[in-house]
Amino acid sequence: MGKNRQQNINPALWLEEHGDLLYRFARCRVKDSFTAEDLVQETLLSACQATESYIGAATISTWLVGILKHKIADYYRSRKPEQTEGNPEAFADTIESMFDSREKWKVKPQDWGKTPERKYEQKELRHAIDGCLDDMDERMSQVFSLREIHGVGTDELCRFFDIEKGNFWVILYRARMILRRCLEFNWFEKDKETP
Amino acid sequence: MHWIMSCKQISMLISQSLDTPLPLTRRMGIRLHLMMCIFCRRYNRHLHLIHSLLVREQKNFLENEKLSLQARQRILQAVDKEMRRKQVRR
């Protein structure tokens, strides 16, 4: 019990024991490692200031991750991209143009051939995905990356970006539609030209 | 929603199914549609291909991520400073 107590007010020990966990959690959710490090620092500083708010019920790591989640949400709120303000209507026309008036495929998905199984093929495809994401609306590619690359849950992401679930699914849908088509165009179609 | 859904509706639902469990009727609607529509079948395969490729990467990525020594020291200093300030205030 005495040991637990000491642990409660020892931020250096929190860093020692939970630093990597917090860092990994943050690293998945923000673009670069520096931001992730800053978020870990801010989390621990807030924790120092709020040791009283720590109720022994949660484990230290749960409590710290809870603080970190707030920090990440603040981070996203503070830097909303200017261009489209996460407006999912921005790409509505692009998606619309992929279907005809009877809602059948106009830009028909093509046969991509065999699934790339070799390592280098997968690597190339991965590069192509990055290229397509770079061309995409910033907020859209952010939402997509967090969801697909880092597996962040729906509820958590809606909170990060302050959007409703329905909107969230529309953004992801459009991101996937655009990415799929982009890959088809840049990768699989080009591939076919060279024998 | 109608039992027979359009390609556009199906494409939306397939995307959604990657993020949330769908009700049985929707799942059956998708399956029925996929049996009849080669383009939606391809679309479905493509989305899953992208998904599985990125999920695999996620696992590799996480195993290798750690706080650097410099970052640790920097954070430790900041935390120490904060704790000392707090003690002074008391």
Image: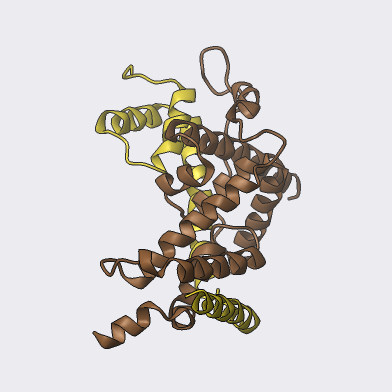
Residue A3 found in image quarter: bottom left
| Left or right: B21, with A64 as reference point | left
Q: Position of residue A13 (x, y in %)?
A: 44, 83
Q: Position of residue A46 (x, y in %)?
A: 50, 65
Q: Closest to the observer: A116 or A22?
A: A22
Q: Is residue A135 visible?
A: yes
| Left or right: A121, with B57 as reference point | right
Q: Quadrant of the N terminus of chain A?
A: bottom left
Figure check: A139 above or below B37? below
Which residue occupies 59% across, 49% down? A76
Figure check: B60 above or below A160? below
Q: Closest to the observer: A177 or B4?
A: A177
Figure check: A153 above or below A109? below
Colour logic? by chain
| Left or right: A94, with A170 as reference point | right
> Count of labels shown?
0
Q: Position of residue A112 (x, y in %)?
A: 58, 44
Q: Position of residue A128 (x, y in %)?
A: 68, 52
Outermost bottom residue: A3
Chain that appears brown: A
- Name the tint of chain B in the rendering: yellow
Q: Can residue A114 be seen in this view?
A: no
Residue A55 found in image quarter: bottom left
Outermost right residue: A194
